[in-house]
Image (cartoon, helix red, strand yellow):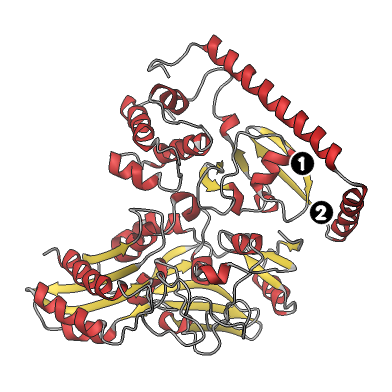
């Protein structure tokens, strides 16, 4: 990847390309699932729904990326699954689903948390920010820009969590040195090993004094 | 995750009633351990009682006693001015635990209630007396690298995973509890228990009882303190061994000493005899070595964790050196 951030036009082009790929995957896996579902499986799914009805759904209101949501949710739905499976906010990633990798990091009332280890119903009245809520229109957040500039990723799967964590790390005042950044970013695992570049990206935003 | 019903009481009595009357109900605060256990099928509650609306979030200093509400977040407590000023050991221990994301969710009460991370406890296909009493212990003859070297039994060799609790044990904290039969106070060292032949019980709380606060009495351990955690990676891992060391030194003489260890027993492991040998002595490496020798006399290793005995010995000495700044 180039050391200079791409211009907005090519970012937009990339975005469209990725969305097209995602839509294709969604459609093709849905068709595959239908083709493979035997009648017995369909029946079992219906029974599951009947059992689910015994457990009352809970009304929940929250604000996600500045938009108000009034939802009715099963209590067992995690915040992560709500975002990804029900609201199509798939930027937040499911890595381990056990609070060990940080891929699911979002902000709740400004604080970073692991969205896989909290129930959506526990977020009543809260303000959630996900990776989709970080940029202002087409203008990337300074941390997003810095990640691109410093090549702060390889496969990209941990990146939304890394960026959400990095923004919080800067806002908390925990980006005073490379060692402090490493310690306070330790909840985000990158299996590609982009750590050095991630630290560089955060250091640059910190030293640039930009508002995050 | 199995299905469950959910309620969010707004007062303590309603919360206590909900759990006291329903054997399959559990309190949930941060949820960082409970939801993990539920996803693994280790704990299957039919009802969750969300206590996050209860007024248990205060931190205040009353007559030199630091009162910490049970719902104070680990991150908030670690960064609190009163904690940094009067009990820096606690702040250090909190920051050694988990990640900032988890500390932003985890509460003081929940940290105390977290279960062991023994892999046999988590794996529902394996025997575990803590998970299924009477089923046996997979760890004793299995892979026991992470396990206890103090206070274990023939039924369980799991360790308590908390860092915060190690500091609170060293600082002689008190646990405030409310329950169906009223309120009571438990010395921190008596809150968690050794496994004996009932490892399914981690602590001395009764059914429906809830932690409302922790209190730390004033002490002289504001300067010469150190929490040293040894783990498989530099950050964000459970302790192989950890040591909370606090010294009160004047005129090069140790006037008071506190030592506790994590990662070595079913509960935070206080080293009272080692503390006593330090009183009246100079803060020297040789004196610290004597204390460490005493601390390790009752240690027993299993097949894969014998390394913990010399490691713990060295960690005690290093933590004391760091605390004394020698």
Q: Is residue A146 left or right of residue A139?
A: left
Q: Chain of mark 1?
A: A
Q: Residues within 10 Å of mark 2 (few under 14, many from 20)?
A: some
Q: Quadrant of the N terminus of chain B?
A: bottom right
The residue most toward the left is B251
Task: Residue under label 1, please give it.
Answer: A70
Q: Quadrant of residue B31?
A: bottom right
Give whichever of discs 2 and 1 has the lower sequence position: 2
Left or right relative to B253: residue B123: right
Give me the C-alpha separation between circle 2 and circle 1.
Answer: 13 Å
**Residues packed near mark 1 inside 10 Å, few (<14), some (14 to 19) or many (20 plus):** few
Circle 2 sits on which residue? A57
Residue A128 x, y percent position in the rendering? 61, 40
Q: Quadrant of residue B227?
A: bottom left
Mark linked to residue A55: none
Q: Secondary structure at mark 2?
A: loop
Residue visible at 59% across and 67% down in the picture = B123
- Residue B283 shows up from this direction: no
């Amino acid at each position: 990847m180039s050391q200079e951030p791409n211009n907005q036009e090519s970012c937009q082009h990339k975005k469209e390309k990725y969305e097209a790929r995602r839509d294709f995957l969604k459609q093709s896996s849905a068709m595959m699932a239908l083709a493979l579902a035997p009648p017995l499986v369909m029946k079992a799914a219906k029974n599951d729904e009947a059992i689910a009805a015994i457990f009352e759904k809970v009304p929940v209101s929250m604000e996600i990326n500045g938009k108000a949501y009034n939802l009715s949710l099963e209590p067992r739905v995690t915040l992560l699954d709500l975002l990804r499976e029900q609201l199509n906010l798939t930027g937040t990633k499911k890595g381990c689903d056990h609070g060990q990798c940080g891929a699911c990091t979002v902000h709740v009332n400004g604080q970073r948390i692991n969205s896989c280890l909290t129930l959506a119903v526990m977020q009543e009245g809260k303000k959630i920010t996900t990776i989709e809520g970080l940029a202002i229109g087409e203008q990337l957040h300074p941390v997003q820009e810095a990640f691109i500039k410093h090549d702060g990723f390889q496969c990209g799967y941990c990146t939304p969590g890394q960026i959400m964590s990095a923004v919080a790390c800067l806002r908390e005042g925990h980006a005073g040195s490379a060692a402090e950044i490493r310690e306070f970013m330790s909840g985000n695992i990158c299996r590609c090993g982009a750590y050095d570049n991630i630290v560089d990206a955060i250091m640059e935003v910190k030293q640039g004094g930009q508002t995050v | 995750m199995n299905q469950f019903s959910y309620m969010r009481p707004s007062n303590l009595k309603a919360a206590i009633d909900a759990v006291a009357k329903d054997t399959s109900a559990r309190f949930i605060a941060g949820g960082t351990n409970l939801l993990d256990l539920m996803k693994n099928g280790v704990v299957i509650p039919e009802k969750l009682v969300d206590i996050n609306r209860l007024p248990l979030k205060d931190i205040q200093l009353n007559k030199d006693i630091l009162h910490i509400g049970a719902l104070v977040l680990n991150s908030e407590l670690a960064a609190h001015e009163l904690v940094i000023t009067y009990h820096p050991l606690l702040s250090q221990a909190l920051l050694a635990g988990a990640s900032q994301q988890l500390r932003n969710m985890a509460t003081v009460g929940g940290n105390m209630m977290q279960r062991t991370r023994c892999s046999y406890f988590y794996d529902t296909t394996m025997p575990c007396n803590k998970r299924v009493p009477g089923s046996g212990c997979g760890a004793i003859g299995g892979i026991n690298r992470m396990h206890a070297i103090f206070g274990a039994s023939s039924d369980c060799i799991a360790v308590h995973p908390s860092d915060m609790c190690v500091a609170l044990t060293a600082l002689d904290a008190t646990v405030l509890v409310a329950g169906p039969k009223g309120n009571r106070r438990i010395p921190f060292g008596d809150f968690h228990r050794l496994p004996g032949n009932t490892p399914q019980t981690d602590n001395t709380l009764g059914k429906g009882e809830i932690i409302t606060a922790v209190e730390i009495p004033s002490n002289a351990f504001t300067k010469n303190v150190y929490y040293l955690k040894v783990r498989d990676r530099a950050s964000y891992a459970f302790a192989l061994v950890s040591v909370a060391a606090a010294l009160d030194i004047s005129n090069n003489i140790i006037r008071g000493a506190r030592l506790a260890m994590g990662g070595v027993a079913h509960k935070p492991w206080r080293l009272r005899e080692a503390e006593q040998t330090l009183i009246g002595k100079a803060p020297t490496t040789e004196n610290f070595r004597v204390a460490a020798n005493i601390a390790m006399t009752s240690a027993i290793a299993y097949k894969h964790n014998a390394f913990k005995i010399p490691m713990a010995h060295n960690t005690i000495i290093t933590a004391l050196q760091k605390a004394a700044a020698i």
